[in-house]
Amino acid sequence: MTDVLPQASVTAETSAPAETRRLVSPFERLGLRGRPLATANWLGVAVGVYVLITAVELIGSGFKAATGDSAESLFAFASNPFVALMVGVLFTAAVQSSSTTTSVTVGLVAGGLPIDIAIPMLMGANIGTTLTNTLVSLGMARDKESFRRAFSAATVHDFYNLVAVAIFLPLEMMFGLLERTSSWLAQATSGSDGGVVATVFSGIGSVVDTVTEPLAAGLEGATSFLPDPWHGIVMIVLGIGLILAVINWLGRLLKVLLVGRAAQVLHSSVGRGPISGIASGAAVTMMVQSSSTTTSLMIPLAGSGTFSLKQIYPFTVGANIGTTVTALIAAFAFSGAEATLALQAAFVHLLFNVFAALVVFGLPLLRQLPLRGATWLGDVAATNKLWAAGWVLGVFVGIPALLIGITVLL
């Protein structure tokens, strides 16, 4: 769910000896210990999920209030799919959280954002989220050999997502692959005529919507004194702020509760084969709800030589799949026609990562491309650190900002 993980904390948590490393719950400051502390932690997770869903609902309502029937014209600058892709990259890199980007996008789609604009934005979130573990690898820059291994392990995630986008964005532009398949899935899992699955999904959505409605309505009412479109804009900003805060909160609690079990899964399965690596990457990410956490945990292990680049590669592929759970949870903020739109956006993120795993990692020729790119970049970056700085600034800031600026000016 959360992809927010500051560089310093990642390095400290992953490089410190296991016996001296201890994650602290916010509730410990209240003097709680033992079972009461564990209960408080799990209740904190439940409250966090509740606030997350409410915030997504708030964004959807705010977007409707702010744009009326002009949502498409408001995002006309992003009608170019490459610009929408860059918006996703920049926003995710800025907040260091693909979960925030996907949750916000789900809310915007439910509020009227065209799905053909949302799809490249969701793809961009995959690229932007890899910034975190790339930054973590820079912490090992003092030792040339360790940095070479760490930077290669970090950027294999970059190259994998770049190859995936290079394949599936053109396919989307030509055939609407993700839009068509996600639409079919959303229709099959929502409404009243989609069978048992649709009945279950609709029932969950209705219950969640009923439970979260009081808080959402209260927040909406608190800003209702503002005239449109400012009323809607404030709701959007408030929703994004809540998502950022709650994702960080959930990340802290889930790491306290599950990081030990996640580490056991990691050490018992990574290196046993590609299928095991993908499965463990997905499982660990779903457990700690942060793809940045799971991939960043691997960087010191790669730098020390504990795991090879080939062993870490499938783990990062699985982490991409595991992080899609957040958007699916966010989609339950809506019911009726809005639920179908929200589910479609969530399914886009899921399908993109599943298709990418099947095609990029599944085909031997394509599977080698991220490995070769990361190996080459690790070698040149270890020789000259300016390559590392140029890669980070160029891929995550310079190129996206330049493309958006050119499009806006033209």
Image (cartoon, rainbow, N blue to C red):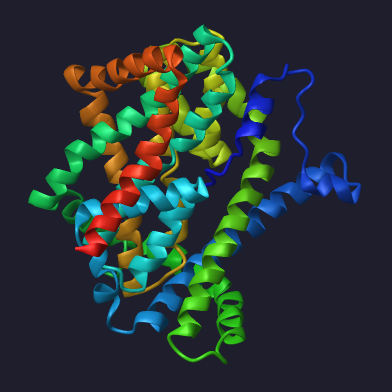
Q: For the C terminus, give its image quadrant.
A: bottom left
Taking the view exactly as shown, the residue that stands out farthest to the right is 31
Residue at 33%, 66% in the rendered image: 109
Residue at 40%, 72% in the rendered image: 335
Snapshot quadrant of residue 377: top left
Vertically, is 371 above or below 92? above
Q: Position of residue 35 (x, y in %)?
A: 83, 42
Asked if residue 348 can be seen in this view, the reply is no
Snapshot quadrant of residue 376: top left
- Foreground: 161 or 262? 161
Snapshot quadrant of residue 12: top right
Q: Is residue 344 left or right of residue 66?
A: left
Taking the view exactly as shown, the residue that stands out farthest to the left is 174
Asked if residue 148 can be seen in this view, the reply is yes
Vertically, is 254 above or below 115? above
Number of numbered discs visible in the structure rendering: 0
Q: Position of residue 195 (x, y in %)?
A: 27, 61
Vertically, is 230 above or below 348? below
Residue at 28%, 15% in the rendered image: 372
Q: Position of residue 83 (x, y in %)?
A: 26, 55
- Foreground: 171 or 389? 389
Vertically, is 373 above or below 337? above
Residue at 45%, 63% in the rendered image: 332
